[in-house]
Amino acid sequence: MKKNYEDIGFAKIDHHRIKRKGFPEVIYGEGKTPEQVAKIAKGIWDHGHDVLATRADKQMFLAVKNKLANAKYFDTARIITVKKVVSGKQKAVSRKIAVVTAGTADLPVAEEAAVTAEFLGDPVERIFDVGVAGIHRLIKNLKNIKRAKVVIVVAGMEGALPSVLGGLIDKPIIAVPTSVGYGSSFKGLAALLTMLNSCAPGVAVVNIDNGFGAAVVAHSIIKSCA
């Protein structure tokens, strides 16, 4: 019988998480050494689970790649994945997640969300750089956004895009404030407060720069509707 967790000294790998949450434990790379990330990844993989590591750098990727040859690195997202090749039906496009950004500077957080959602098996459509400073760009892409089941909106600066989009569509919106902006943005705090104070109904907010968290919430919504 497989253990619920594996004690490797510096970490206790939660092998039971897939039964509780529907996906395996995810490795948060920041604060860990490349060797620690690689050892945790190997433990997860050897237990029969796919591997996702967020906030990972290239040194961490090379350490994982040395142990798991099929590891992939997503540079913009700073994510490492190791996945089994599984043949089967793709999820319906009607269950897709739209990842929308206000600006190009928000791409690292948006890609963290998009790659995480794809790792979890959800179709993703990326719609980038449609912020309120050029509202015509958003309007032109509105039809594609409306086709999504859930919309993740990533924005820094003043963080207005989720509120604007929330007044235009009937889909659940997960707003992600980013730490993009000049001094008075307070490293994302201004965007966070704007999103929390949105008057548009149907907007939920995750923490600053938390693309991973937004993807997991979106996946949970889609899974509950399946």
Image: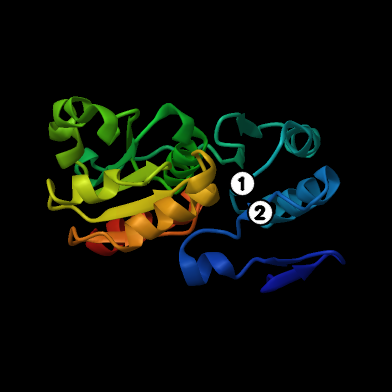
Quarter holding the N terminus is: bottom right
Q: Which mark is residue 111?
A: none
The image quadrant that residue 117 belongs to is top left
Residues under numbered marks 1 and 2 in contact, where contact means CB atoms less than 8 Å apart: yes
> Does residue 33 appear left or right of residue 178 in this picture?
right
Q: Earlier in the sequence, mark 1 or mark 2?
A: 2
Which of 11/49 is in front?
A: 11
Query: Could you say which is closer to the camera, residue 122 or residue 166?
Result: 166
Number of dots carrying numbers: 2
Q: Which residue is mark 1?
A: 54
Q: Residue at x 48, y 67 (%)?
A: 21
Left or right? Give the position of 103 relative to 69. Answer: left
**Looking at this view, is 192 or 6 the one in front?**
192
- Image quadrant holding the C terminus, namely bottom left
The residue located at (34%, 29%) in the rendering is 128
Residue assigned mark 2:
27
Mark 1 residue element: strand
Q: Secondary structure at mark 2?
A: strand
Residue kind at label 2, given as amino acid type: Ile
Callout 1 amino acid = Thr
**Residue at figure coordinates x 68%, y 50% from the top left:** 45
Residue 126: x and y, percent?
34, 32
For the point 76% across and 49% down, the residue is 37
Where 173 falls versus 143 (above or below)? below
